[in-house]
Structures are given as structure tokens and as C-alpha cells.
Amino acid sequence: MSAPIVITNVSLYGDTPSDIVIVDGQISSLTAADVPADARTMDGSGLVALPGLVDLHTHLREPGREDAETIETGSRSAARGGFTAVHAMANTTPTADTAGVVELVASRGREVGLVDVYPVGAVTVGLNGTQLSEMGAMANSRAQVRVFSDDGKCVHDPLLMRRALEYVKTFDGVIAQHAQEPRLTEGSQMHEGLVSAELGLAGWPAVAEESIIARDVLLAEHVGSRVHICHLSTAGSVDIVRWAKARGIQVTAEAMPHHLLLTDESARGYDPRFKVNPPLRTQEDVDALRAGLEDGTIDIVATDHAPHPDEDKDCEWGAAAFGMIGLETALGIVQKTMVDTGRLTWRDVARILSETPASIGRDEAHGRPLAVGEPANITLVDPAAAWTVDPAGTDSRSNNSPFGGIELPGRAVATFLRGTPTYLDDRFTALTEGAPA
Amino acid sequence: MKHLLGTQNLSREDAVLILDTAGQMAATQEREIRKLPTLRGRTVVNLFFEDSTRTRISFEAAAKRLSADVINFSAKGSSLSKGESLKDTALTLQAMGADAVVVRHWASGAAQRLAESGWLHGSVSVLNAGDGTHQHPTQALLDAFTMRRHLMAANVGDSVDGKGLDGLTVAIVGDVLHSRVAGSNIALLRTLGAKVVVVAPPTLLPYGLERDGGVSVHFTLDDALEAHDLDAIMMLRVQRERMTGGGSGFFPSPEEYTRLFGLDRARMDRMPGHAIILHPGPMNRGLEISAEAADSPRSVIVEQVSNGVAVRMAALYLLLSGEEASA
């Protein structure tokens, strides 16, 4: 447990100015009057305090692809991005489809200690889409898995999906669906539209996502289960989820930062850094996603942080891997696209990047209020610290960011996991000793 | 022009310059000694990641008739078929001192990537000899060259230098969706002032083309012949693997395709007397084109092949000789 810390004059959720006193990993007070003598002080002027960010959709690649990312490098990148918890997707090698693998991932996450790593369990054995994995064993393991996903692949068999939705009710789990009708997307390389037609790249039509979402919300309604939609990317998907919610279906949905900012026009140079699944869509889709996030149709933003080594990206488009890193840029992109545009407040950001993802994932210790007695999982944001993204400077082991050269308005400057700083911006390297004057 | 990657960004001036230069090259090919000293000492690499004997031989003949040294680099069937191989190959070619790289690749965008990725530095020119389902610019240029020669001269043998294809109506028939030949032709024909008519089953049309006001789309060849007085008709090759099977065929059967889209005697006779027939080859006789049509006096299919050499000589010459090319 690290020394007591006092953050002075920080804006809680972007509105109430306050101090935060952290003792023994908890928020012990919100006034700097109650400060232990050995406390270190951080000047929080101009900063926004949020509950530590929670990413429901991260690829840490370990075990299996440690050349792309490890739990350690991914955790460091997450902490730097303001995250205190990440959900590590199951498409590792071996697949996270047994209690043994999820416990390995969780325990390695604890050893590293920079973020809480919640393993996601595979819905089907080996992500093969044919046989349910032992989800009960994963749920009851020390990893306490609550989120199950074949992400990277769609659970496309409707009967299997129905069974999975029903089965996880036993332990209050949720199926996070990668909505992609496989037959409609065979060989697909980018969003199917005018740009794909011009570039001669096989299209990934919006309907391939929307048809699966429509099916799955109806299945969820029929069996009375909750369902979570991964990386929703089209205007039509927003409409379907909005309809489902109005009908009372227990559906939650996530949007990715890249889908809030970039469009299929980015593919014109055939630079595979812009190759991602689901693909970058049109401006109309970007606008619909922003509107859906604003009105609550889309519940959360998650990163789909997907590291790949150079050899999988420094090649021709057709040979390149799908995916982009995003842990360190997510917060800045949300600020740029949603806060600075007046669509969301910082209190909303706390909801979409911390409280609701923690609630969907049943992460008890995260997404908690910034209040006395709560665990000190805190992210300090400097909304005025504009920066230009430099992929080479990332803490991730891979640098496949599509945002190189883009200016973002703000970023996380300090992250605390149970009171311990897991990331501190340069400005805090010499934390002042003692209580504030 | 540093590279020739596609026809979409080719200006009318550059396109006409290439066609005019090809005319001069074609004239030299009538002489007894056909070899020109123009590119002596320059190295042209034919980099083929896909089988294409015809295109490779055409480029090879073009380079050799300009006295360039030619290296054929065929990656077909080797481990060099995916991934970083393109980059590694680029580094190898750079090290060998290539002046121009003629690249045929299965991936759309491969030529552009080769030109713009920074893998090749210095002054290596890239010529796209077909990338995936994207572009095949020299094919479109040789088609334009052929049409211009036949259809734009006031009298047989008159010079067509400086002319485009203004006022012509040209139909492209077949698998437009997967055809880099169609992709390059549609753009170039529009640039040169021709009216483009596209004829294909809806399953083989690129997304959005129907709503593109600049192109007239028909779902049967008879409809197109009814609606337009064609000056030229371009029959695309039907790829066997696109046909049927597994529920994912683009049309029900070869017979149905031939009934709706095949060019036979009856349909040929409905075209104006001066109209010509093109095909990029190799043909499926009896499928997209009947033997009667392919071998008729209207057919310029064999001439397309010889014009291909002249157009590729022009492209190599303009890219490698520099100054005159910029427009």
C-alpha cells in the first residue's frame, strides 16, 4: 500500500471542485483538512477526476502472441490511458476457454498489478462456434469470469447463441457478441460502399452486422437474457438497439473510438493501419454512433485495443491483420468527439468509460462513486493537455495506431489503482512531500 | 508521371500523351528493325505475383524493343505469395538497381503500396500491371488506343493524335464487380469523353454504380442494345470460379449467362455497322462471346494484343525518360 496522497482542488466529474485524500487504498476524505502528516500532495487544479476507466474490450495477446503484446505491456498502456480495469478477450493461444487459461491470465494480471485484468471467457471451445465451452467452470474459477465472447468471430449458429444466452444466467454472465454474419463477409476487407468499389477491396456490408444484432436482441428477449453488442459500427445497428431498448430488451452496446472518429475514406492509401474489423464506416455512421452515444442507445465506449507486430501491418492491405491499438488514445478521442462537441459532460464520460462497463462486466470494485469509503480507483484527466499522437511513443508492444499525427485535446495525467499510482504524467514525477499549505 | 498506378487520377493530357506516344511506337514497329535504343542501360523488372503470361510477355516485349534490360521475377507458387514478401521483394529490387517495376499482384492496392510505402526509395517507377480487383491501367490504355484508331479517324489512316474518345458510346459487358479491366476502362473512357454503358447482372455490379449518374447501367445485353447505338462493345471474361456452386454463385448457370449477356451473331447484327468488338482475353468462346462474333470483321481482339506492346512501350518510355512526360 503506498503512502497517503492528497489531490487538491480537483474537479470531481468535471463539476464539483474538491480535494481527494487517499489513505490505505481508499478515498478517506474529500477535504484536504483531514490529511495525514506523511501525505504527498498533487495539485489538481484544472484537472478532472473520474472513477478509474474500465475497458470491456481489450486484446492483451498473452498467452500466445507475446510478440504483439503481453499482459505487462498491455497493462502499462492501459494505465497510461487512464484505465484501472481491462477485460482481456479470449482469442489467445490457447483460447481462454477453460478455467486454467482464465486463471493464468488473471493471475498474471495481478502479478503485474497495473490494472485489474478480467479475463473474458470463450463462448465456444476454441472459438469454433460449434460447442459451448465450460463457462460454468470459468465463472466459478478464481478468475470469476462474467463476460463471455468469441470476439474475433461471431457466434453465428442461432441455436448455439440461444443456448449460450440462456446458460450464462446461472452465474449472472453476459454474452458479448461480435456481430458479423460470416457468409455475408467472406473475404471482406473494408466497409462495403463507394470507397470499397473504387479501391477494388471486397466489401463488409453493414447488413452483416445489423442482421446478427437484430437476431440476437430478439433471442435475448425470447429467453429473457441480457446480451452485449461488441463494437457496434453502423447507423442501422444504432436504430436496432434503440428499438430493442424501447421494447425493454436487456441489451447493451459499445462503440469504439476509431468508429467515432474515422471513416472508410481512410482506406484510400491502402495503409493497413486503417484495416480493422468491423471496418471503418461512413460519415453517416460516425454521426449516428455519436448520436447514439449521446442519447444512451450506446452504453459505453470500449477500445478493441488490438496490437499487431510490424510484419502484420507493414505490407499490402490484403495480407495485413485486422485491428488497431487504442488504450492510450480512447479518452482523448471521447473528449474530442463527444465532450468538446457538447454532446456529453465529464459526468457522462464517467458513465460510459467506467460505471456502465464495470456494471456490464460485474466488476464490483470499479466504476464506483468518487466518495468517502470507496476504493481509490481514480483517473485524473487534463482536458487542456492537447497532444499529437505518436504511435512510436506508445507503451504497448505494438504501434499499429491509426491516429498518428492526429491532435487530441486532452489525456489522462494520473491513474490510481486502489490508491497506488499506476501512471503519472511527467508533471508529477516529484510528488510534493507533506500536507498542502 | 512518376508511376502509372491507375486511370482514375490520370489527366486527359497525360492519357492523350500516352496514346500519341503509343502511336509513334506502333509506327516504329512496322519497320524492319523494330528495336529502339531509347532505354539502353535501364533495368525493368517484371514482378508477377499472379499468373499472367500474356501481360508479362507484352511488357517484356515492350521493354526489350526499347533496349532495356529485363528481369522477370515470378513469385507464383513460391513462398512469396503473401505478406511481407512484397516489402522484401521491393528491397531486393531496389538493391538490384531496378529503374522500373512492372507489378502484377493479387492484392488490390499492391502497386500503390509499392510506390508509396517508402519501401522503394529513389527514382524507381512503378507500373501497375493489374492489382487484385482494382486497376489495370495499360489494358484500358490499349483499349482506348484501339478504339481511337478505329473510331476517331475521319478517314482511314488519318492521324488521331491529340484526340480523345469524345462522343463515342462504349459498352462494357460482364463481371464488372471483380474486373480490374472494367475498373480502369470506366474511369479512362469518362476522362476521354466517351459515354459508358455497363451491362451486368446486378450481382456483378460494384456497389453504388447504378446510382452513379455518369454511367448507364443495364441488366441484360438486349436492353443495352435497344437503348444505345454502340460504337464499341467490350466483352469481359467470365471467371469460372464466379459462376455457380455452394449457393454463392453470382449467376445460376453458364447457359443463363450466355442467354442474357453473351454476344452472338444476332446481337452483333443489332449494333451499328461501324461498331467494333473488344475482349481483353483470354476468351471463353461460347460463353461470353460466340466464335462468330470473336472471329468477325468487327472484332479487333487480335489487334488489341499488338497495340498492347505499343502502349506499354509508350508508358515505359514516358516514365523512364522523364521530362516530356509531365503534363
Image (cartoon, rainbow, N blue to C red):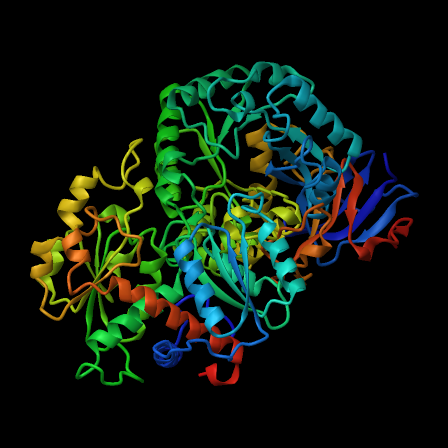
- Residue B58 versus residue B322 in the image, above or below: above
In the displayed structure image, the side of residue B255 where residue B114 appears, left or right: right
Residue A408 visible: no
In the displayed structure image, the side of residue B129 where residue B147 appears, left or right: left
**Residue at image location 53% in from the left, 28% down from the top:** A149
- The front one of A138 and A265 is A265
**Residue at image location 78% in from the left, 34% down from the top:** A113
State the residue lying farthest toward the front: B32
**Residue at image location 49% in from the left, 69% down from the top:** B64
- In percent of width and height, residue A307 lies at 64, 44
> Which quadrant does the C terminus of chain A fall into?
bottom right
- In percent of width and height, residue B244 lies at 27, 36
- The front one of A220 and A65 is A65
- Residue B40 versus residue A171 in the image, above or below: below
Residue A154 visible: yes
- Residue A211 versus residue A102 in the image, above or below: below
- The front one of A311 and B121 is B121
- In percent of width and height, residue A200 lies at 40, 54
- The front one of A286 and A419 is A286
In the displayed structure image, the side of residue A346 where residue A433 appears, left or right: right
Q: Quadrant of residue B167?
A: bottom left
> Which quadrant does the N terminus of chain A fall into?
top right
- In percent of width and height, residue A121 lies at 59, 24
**Residue at image location 21% in from the left, 79% down from the top:** B152
